[in-house]
Amino acid sequence: MKRRLSFVALLAFFWLSLSGHFDLLLLSLGAISVALVTVLALRMHMVDRDGHPAQMVPRIPLFYAWLAREVALSSTAVLRMVVNGKYEPAVGRVRTRQLTPLGTATLANSITLTPGTLSLRVLSDEIEVHSLDQRLLQELQEGELPQRVLNFDNPPAVNTDA
């Protein structure tokens, strides 16, 4: 029930932020459209853990800030490689370690958002990646991105025994 209410609240907020109008007619039409989309999403069974990941909302700002930092660092590294002409394209695989399809999709999209790397194909427990340079691929394979996405999707349990 909390997920459904969160879904309705998110749709209403999204509609209000896009319309910016608060007269009675437009608010009524917005309420009708939110109700219609909610009914359709519920009938299609899309308001579930993957379709509306409300449990991830508190972790989004920290993950996005970290990812933005990584994108900036990678942009600088790619710029240096291209300007110097010293890069060697490579294709390899990154082990996912993700527990959910949403986590795998988040990892693949994060790889593609990072300059110099591109997710080519998602396999059962790996993602095939093209990178501008072998070092970028090695960073993905040994780096912290897969673990960060795993923690973003499934945070580690807090020990309350202490």
Image (cartoon, grey):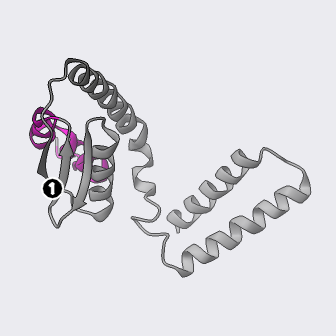
- Packing grade of label 1 (10 A; few <14, some 14-19, many >=20) is some
Question: Is 92 left, or right, of 150 in this rendering?
Answer: left
Counting the numbered discs, the total is 1
Question: Is 29 left, or right, of 159 in this rendering?
Answer: right
Q: Quadrant of the C terminus?
A: top left
Question: Is 44 left, or right, of 157 in this rendering?
Answer: right
Residue 132 to residue 124: above or below: above
Residue with the mark numbered 1: 97
Residue 98 location, x and y as percent?
A: 21, 57
Q: Residue furthest bottom?
A: 43
Residue 9 to residue 131: above or below: below
Residue 108 location, x and y as percent?
A: 28, 52
Mark 1: amino acid: Arg
Looking at the rendered structure, the secondary structure element under dot 1 is loop
* Residue at 55% over, 67% down: 4
Quarter of the image for residue 87 reads: top left
Return the residue nearer the eye: 76 or 106.
76
* Residue at 9% over, 38% down: 138
* Residue at 63% over, 76% down: 39
Query: Which span is picked out in magenta?
Result: 133-161
Residue 28 location, x and y as percent?
A: 84, 62
Q: Residue furthest front?
A: 85
Q: Is residue 151 magenta?
A: yes
Question: Is 53 left, or right, of 148 in this rendering?
Answer: right
Residue 159 visible from this viewpoint: no
* Residue at 45% over, 48% down: 57
Residue 47 location, x and y as percent?
A: 49, 69
Quarter of the image for residue 48 reads: bottom left
Residue 84 visible from this viewpoint: yes
Q: Main secondary structure of the magenta part?
A: helix
